[in-house]
Amino acid sequence: MSFEEAFKYHSRRKFLKHTGLGFGALAMQGLLQDPNYLSAQPVPNLETGKNELSAVRSPHFAPKATRVIWLFMPGSPSQVDTFDFKPELQKRNGQKLKGADPKTGFFTTTGKLLGSPFKFKRHGESGAYVSEIFPHMSRHVDDMAFIYSCYSRSNNHTPAMLEMNSGFFLQGRPCMGSWVTYGLGTENRNLPGFVVMHGVKPRGDDPIWAPGFLPKVYQPTAIDGRSQTPIANLDRLKSLNDKQQRTVLDFLKEFNEEHSKLRPYEADLSARLESFELAYRMQTAAPEAMDVSQESEATQQMYGVDKKETQLVAKQCLAARRLVERGVRFIQIYAGTNGGGGGVGDVPWDGHNDIGANHRIAAKSTDQPIAALLTDLKQRGLLESTLVVWGGEFGRTSDSQGSKGRDHNPNAFTMWLAGGGIKGGVQYGASDEFGYKAVENRVNVHDLHATILHLLGLDHEKLTYRFNGRDYRLTDVAGEVIQELLL
């Protein structure tokens, strides 16, 4: 039958209705054949047999690392005052910086070179330069791979932190910890797969570590290291005993499951059910895991728990070691000072006025705890499977802000990685002779993310999530694994 003959027997309305339904069916068939369409649906937990969004998933290939501890330095350390030694900067202190842009940073710089107020010295067999402000970390340079050529796109704290975490400088994209737990799941059912530890919250607040459009089961558990109740809303109501609380949760779960049966593709419903159960199990497991007082006195002293200036970061780093021992997948520590003195509270490494005074205080609060963490992980045989990442959201200018400060600089900064498949002693990339811009083997945030995912056994081009009709990934349409850093 020809098209003209078929049309005689149908009204225009019926014809459009039938063809519309046909196209819809074709679209649905295409979606169901797409391997990513159901990628956020629950999968069987091998331990319980129950379907869970957070159940362990297989990596794309054999991983070198199974855990990540990301040591985030809010406010951003100056590359030329920490690990990227520039003799020429010292020699030409006070001279004009050729090509200086006074608006590189967030404020305005002088265009005059500012030499570092710190002495540098070579350390280890690798001969890596380290500033005098890191006497403890300097002993570990042969386990570290330094990247001297990092750069980003924003010169403001919040968008730069968003970019460092999510690959994009606007809110709404999932952060790396959420991508990792989405891709690999969590091994300990009694603890979250993704934990964030902070003192004063950094600029940008919770959105900088948010799961974005991923199901909310992949959001982090945020822990305030200054609080007597570091995990909010975890304690059981005093009016309920354990049996009564279990009865309430079972009753709630029954209704939620009936509700979710009618909405099988609503991932956030499954996430909500899992969050109730996880919170219940965490009431016992989380306080025990975070209780660093269970450690020996010698261990606590090694980290600096007994000293006022290091106490906060020491407890965070020691708790991080306890968490990775218990199977927590991804831990981020926002570290600097104990809240004031080193910087503007929430951005402790932000040395606008006096880089020397600022960095001495911020470094003193982090140096011993971080070095102790590396020592402890190595002694316990955990460093081989735990990737440790150190760095801020951007760098600092080589020319001065005022007479003694440095402004923000997204064009060059240094990061280091250790453990988890990293080749220790590597010194990769380079900034120019003054540390002003990355010039050799430049590394952007997507490259860094691709490398971390690779070490976890994840192909950054295959780790995708369908949202609003598009397959998104952490590295967007960019990112190269830095092979030179890998064992």
Image (cartoon, helix red, strand yellow):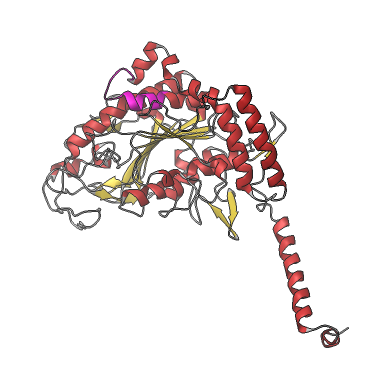
Q: Is residue 393 visible?
A: yes
The x, y position of residue 83, in whole percent, is 29, 36
- In the displayed structure, 228 sits above or below 262; it is above
Q: Is residue 151 visible?
A: no
Q: Nearer the viewer, residue 73 or 375?
A: 73
Q: Nearer the viewer, residue 74 or 395?
A: 74
- In the displayed structure, 372 sits above or below 186; it is above
Q: Is residue 38 left or right of residue 458?
A: right
Residue plotted at (59% across, 38% down): 184
Quadrant of the rendered image containing residue 395: top left
The stretch drawn in magenta includes residue 91 = no
Residue plotted at (55% across, 44% down): 216
Q: The N terminus appears in which quarter of the rendering?
A: bottom right
Q: Is residue 183 left or right of residue 14?
A: left
Bounds of the magenta span? 305-318
In the rendered picture of this protein, how many numbered marks are placed on residues? 0
Quadrant of the rendered image containing residue 30: bottom right
The x, y position of residue 218, in whole percent, is 55, 41
The x, y position of residue 324, in whole percent, is 50, 27
The stretch drawn in magenta includes residue 317 = yes
Q: Residue furthest right?
A: 1
- In the displayed structure, 23 sits above or below 220; it is below
The x, y position of residue 181, in whole percent, is 56, 39
- In the displayed structure, 378 sits above or below 8; it is above
